[in-house]
Image (cartoon, helix red, strand yellow):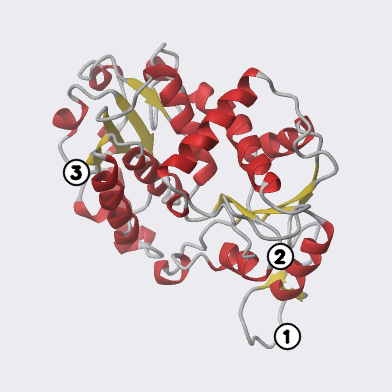
Amino acid sequence: MTVRHFLSTQDYSRAEIDALLEQAAEFKRSPAGQQLAGKSIALMFFNPSMRTRTSFELGAFQLGGHAVVLSPGKDAWPIEFEVGSVMDGDTEEHIAEVARVLSRYVDLIAVRAFPKFVDWSVDREDKVLKSFARYATVPVINLETITHPCQELAHALALKEHLGNLQNRKYVLTWTYHPKPLNTAVANSALLIATKMGMDVTLLCPTPEYILDERYMEFAKANARENGGSLQVSHDIEASYRDADVIYAKSWGAIPYFGRWDEEKAIREANRHFIVDEAKMALTNNGLFSHCLPLRRNIKATDAVMDSPACIAIDEAENRLHVQKAVMASLISQSSGGKSGLGF
């Protein structure tokens, strides 16, 4: 059987996403279990982490499993990902060996690898994650690359806890200022999960340059059609916030300037007013506010917004633990000993 991975929520149906969220809610009520008893997961961190590492390590432990944390290039050998490469540089071993050897040791492999921020046409291929999935013989989980599906699930669970039915709720994904350009992963993922849950989604950004990659815009349009929601792009702050049920903030770099961030800087600097503040939140329908964290206070959102009852960012962060346990348990339960294919 073919191994099924957890690389993107777009690979999962709405029913499958709902099932994962239901299992996560159950884990939140009863944290301990034995679903991973005798099982193990390799956590491959090519980039720093706080919530992701902590929640995955603890999640595996709480379900009776064991996590091995590796940082290639630091505490593990640097890895080569190019097929046919002559390895006469800094890399010591090829992903073809790494993924297959790890698959003999562990039952799950999880990968965090951010874009290089040089050439979007290269980064959008998500080579590191896809290479692990290509060569591994056990399920691979995306810990954040150019999307962040675990964050999506945590976000959706928090919204359901506070709002109940999410169908046709007004959801605003707003760009916010940051002193440096950031990955589009969480923004891509927020767009995907909100449209998959049937919400009426507005992508609010300063200029057309900040519209997300066409792949994710098309996925979101398809999700909206399939789930009875809607998607629109706006550059109007007041109209977007008015009567919103959810404001989700994120900073991201403008793709047309990818790798040429000095040219984009003037646009970013001119739009500091996109900060989420009390005046904007007052326009909403007693709306919720959230962010994936980490968040620079009084840059992306004010202290008053972060400390208000409307802010559910901490709930969302907690939910990372529960949804990731659901993902791990699901992948393990549907594999034969964790070493063969899945049939969700």
Which numbered disc covers residue 316? none
Check disc 2 and report the residue beneath it. 137
Query: Who comes first in sequence, dot 3 or dot 2?
Result: 2
User: Residue 193: horizontal and vertical position, in percent?
Assistant: 39, 41
User: Residue 254: horizontal and vertical position, in percent?
Assistant: 32, 55
In front: label 2 or label 1: 2
3D distance between C-alphas at marks 3 and 2: 40 Å
Q: Is residue 203 above or below residue 311?
A: below
User: Residue 171: horizontal and vertical position, in percent?
Assistant: 28, 31
Sort mark 3 into few (<14), some (14-19) or many (20+) by Cα contacts within 10 Å. few
> Do tag 1 and tag 3 residues touch (Cβ < 8 Å)?
no
Q: Is residue 7 left or right of residue 171?
A: right
Label 3: element kind: strand
Using the image as rendered, state which of residue 328 and residue 54 is in the foreground. 328
Query: Who comes first in sequence, dot 1 or dot 3?
Result: 1
Using the image as rendered, state which of residue 23 and residue 276 is in the foreground. 23
Residue sitting at x 80%, y 55%: 106
Check disc 3 and report the residue beneath it. 232
Residue sitting at x 47%, y 55%: 146
Check disc 1 and report the residue beneath it. 88
Q: Specify the quadrant that holds the N terminus.
A: bottom right
In front: label 3 or label 2: 2
Label 1: element kind: loop
Tag 2: amino acid: Thr
> Do tag 3 and tag 2 residues touch (Cβ < 8 Å)?
no
Query: Who comes first in sequence, dot 2 or dot 1?
Result: 1
3D distance between C-alphas at marks 2 and 1: 28 Å
Label 2: element kind: loop
Q: Quadrant of residue 190?
A: top left
Tag 1: amino acid: Asp
* Residue, far top: 309
